[in-house]
Image: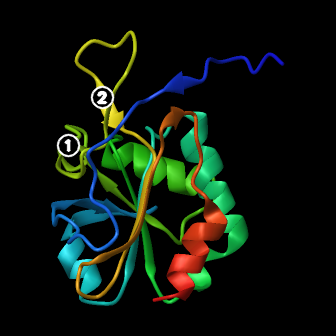
Amino acid sequence: MNLGFDVVELGEADHPEAGDEAPDFTRPLVNDEYWADASLSELIDDGPVVLLFHTMDGDFPATYIWQEIDKRGWDDYDVSVVGLSISSPYEHSRFLEEWDVEQYRIFSDPQNGVAEEYGIVNDLDGMAGVSEPRPAVFVVDEDRTIEFAWVATDWPEFPPYDDVEAAIEGL
């Protein structure tokens, strides 16, 4: 079967696991209209968070992931579902509006420092000096404890949505 792209093995990642404290960070948090600096701990003050790392906004996995999350109605859960990628606030705002997932927000991290803290940096083939986070999902409770962690080992690989939903329901 010709997929039109190569599946790439990403190898091991040294990321936080369930039971670990989620590293805190502050970055611009973007919706379809504006952005402002926010920290993970500020979001957690309002309740649990699903932190979704994804590829840059123009890449098909990001689009597919957000459309699947929207189709599954994750905004109905009593958690904040937020993304994070290297795309700029302007790109995030357009992305959310264009793909009609305006009820979600995405952190902008162009230098990929948060992915570095989480141990999930993916150096992009053929793009010297450019990296992005590998797809990953962390379900974080009110104590900033990671209750569920998934990190892609291949590109493209998509989150185990049912497992994430079970972790959210278990909070």
Occupied quadrant, residue 140: bottom left
Up-down: is 33 above or below 2?
A: below
Which of pointers 2 and 1 lies earlier in the amino acid sequence?
1
Q: Are there few (<14), some (14-19), or many (20+) residues within 10 Å of tag 2? A: many
> Is residue 156 rendered to the left or right of residue 144?
right
Residue 58 visible (yes or no): no
Identity, as a three-letter code, of the amino acid under mark 2: Ser
Residue at x 67%, y 75% (from the top left corner): 73
Image quarter hosting the N terminus: top right
Q: Secondary structure at mark 2?
A: strand
> Is residue 38 rendered to the left or right of residue 151?
left
Residue depth check, mark 2 versus mark 1: number of the one nearer the observer = 1
Up-down: is 120 above or below 156?
A: below
Instruction: Name the residue carrying label 1.
Output: 116
Find residue 49 and name its label: none
Up-down: is 39 above or below 91?
A: below
Occupied quadrant, residue 97: bottom right
Residue at x 26%, y 45% (from the top left corner): 14
> Measured from the top left, where is residue 100 in percent x and y?
63, 60
> Measured from the top left, where is residue 121 in percent x and y?
29, 37
Identity, as a three-letter code, of the amino acid under mark 1: Glu
Residue at x 40%, y 31% (from the top left corner): 11
